[in-house]
């Protein structure tokens, strides 16, 4: 979809699932405002299932799946889905845990090359919580890297045959043919029994950065929070809708729109 995004006015009234990126979509300046957390509970009480889709690590995803009012978390850019239900943690891996040692060794080579060639870069502070990927900080805990530095980081990952995706805070790289969209489609069908038609009519996806582009292109109801605007010129597939507010307040706006539409039924 190449058309420019429109307002939320045309959003469908059949939404039963909210799939959302985390950083700078639900969070604001690295934190979760009370409005965002309240929005998650509002969706939960309305019977609308929320699934977080993030590049954040397994350690974070375990906590979110266990303690937040959500149906589960797709983490590390599609490597797994964690769901806490009936007092049991269910972990579905699309990447093989048996390959972790081999992949870690290969990612260490990339990490050292990035450190040597882009000395201003840093490994993400949450790397110790990760199972499958390498996250390079581009602005979260360090001064923002330049566009050229970010391009160099991505090129190093790709030179070694790894996938690399740019988020609002990290460049994430991994080995394997999985990604966020592939895993989301699998869990919606297998875990929640949605047909292809239901996935398009009953699900909304919200995000804020270039690594959300595959999901923007797939979901009929795709939403960008306002802070995605600087990235729009480089996106071939833009979100169909865009919120009036940025980040967490844009997510709250989307939530309120969904609740309002559902209340009119």
Image (tube, helix red, strand yellow):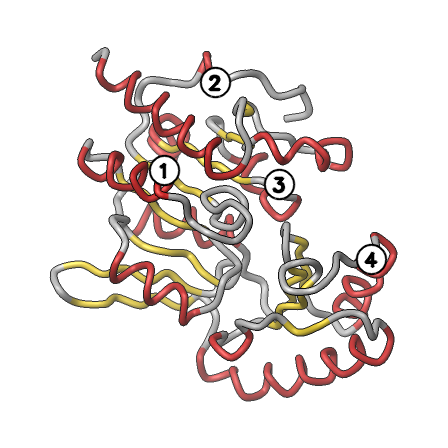
Mark 4–mark 3 contact, CB under 8 Å? Answer: no
Q: Quadrant of residue 148?
A: bottom right
Foreground tag (1 vs 4):
1
From mark 4 to mark 3, how far is it between C-alphas? 17 Å
User: Mark 4 — residue?
Assistant: 151
Residue 99 in picture, x, y percent from top left: 52, 82
Residue 33 in picture, x, y percent from top left: 41, 44
From mark 1 to mark 4, how far is it between C-alphas? 35 Å
Disc 2 element = helix
Q: Is disc 3 surrounded by few (<14), some (14 to 19) or many (20+) residues within 10 Å?
A: many
Foreground tag (4 vs 3):
4
Disc 1 element = helix
Name the quadrant of the N terminus.
top right
Viewer-side residue, 246 vs 205: 246
Mark 1–mark 4 contact, CB under 8 Å? Answer: no
> In the rendered view, would you say 69 is above or below 116?
above
Mark 2–mark 4 contact, CB under 8 Å? Answer: no
Q: Earlier in the sequence, mark 2 or mark 4?
A: 2
Foreground tag (3 vs 2):
2
Disc 4 element = helix
From mark 3 to mark 2, how far is it between C-alphas? 18 Å
User: Mark 1 — residue?
Assistant: 35
Q: Is disc 2 surrounded by few (<14), some (14 to 19) or many (20+) residues within 10 Å?
A: some
User: Mark 3 — residue?
Assistant: 213
User: Mark 2 — residue?
Assistant: 8
The residue sitting at 25% across, 59% down in the picture is 67
Left or right of 40? Residue 252 is right
């Amino acid at each position: 979809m190449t058309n420019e995004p429109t307002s939320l006015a045309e959003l469908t009234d059949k939404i039963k699932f909210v799939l959302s990126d985390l950083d700078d979509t639900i969070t604001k300046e690295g934190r979760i405002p009370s409005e965002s957390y309240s929005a998650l509970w509002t969706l939960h009480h309305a019977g609308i299932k929320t699934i977080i889709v993030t590049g954040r690590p397994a350690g974070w995803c375990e906590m979110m799946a266990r303690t937040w009012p959500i149906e589960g978390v797709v983490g590390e850019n599609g490597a797994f889905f964690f769901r806490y239900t009936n007092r049991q943690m269910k972990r579905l891996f699309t990447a093989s845990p048996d390959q972790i040692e081999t992949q870690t060794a290969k990612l260490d080579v990339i990490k050292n090359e990035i450190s040597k060639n882009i000395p201003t870069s840093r490994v993400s502070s949450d790397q110790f919580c990760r199972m499958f990927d390498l996250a390079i900080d581009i602005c979260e805990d360090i001064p923002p890297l330049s566009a050229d530095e970010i391009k160099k980081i991505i090129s190093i990952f790709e030179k070694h045959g790894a996938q690399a995706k740019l988020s609002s805070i990290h460049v994430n790289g991994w080995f394997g043919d999985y990604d966020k969209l592939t895993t989301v489609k699998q869990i919606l069908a297998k875990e929640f029994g949605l047909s292809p038609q239901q996935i398009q009519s009953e699900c909304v996806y919200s995000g804020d950065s270039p690594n959300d582009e595959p999901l923007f292109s797939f979901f009929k109801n795709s939403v960008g929070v306002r802070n995605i605007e600087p990235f729009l010129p480089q996106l071939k597939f833009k979100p169909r809708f865009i919120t009036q507010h940025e980040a967490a307040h844009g997510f709250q706006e989307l939530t309120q729109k969904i609740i309002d539409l559902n209340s009119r039924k």
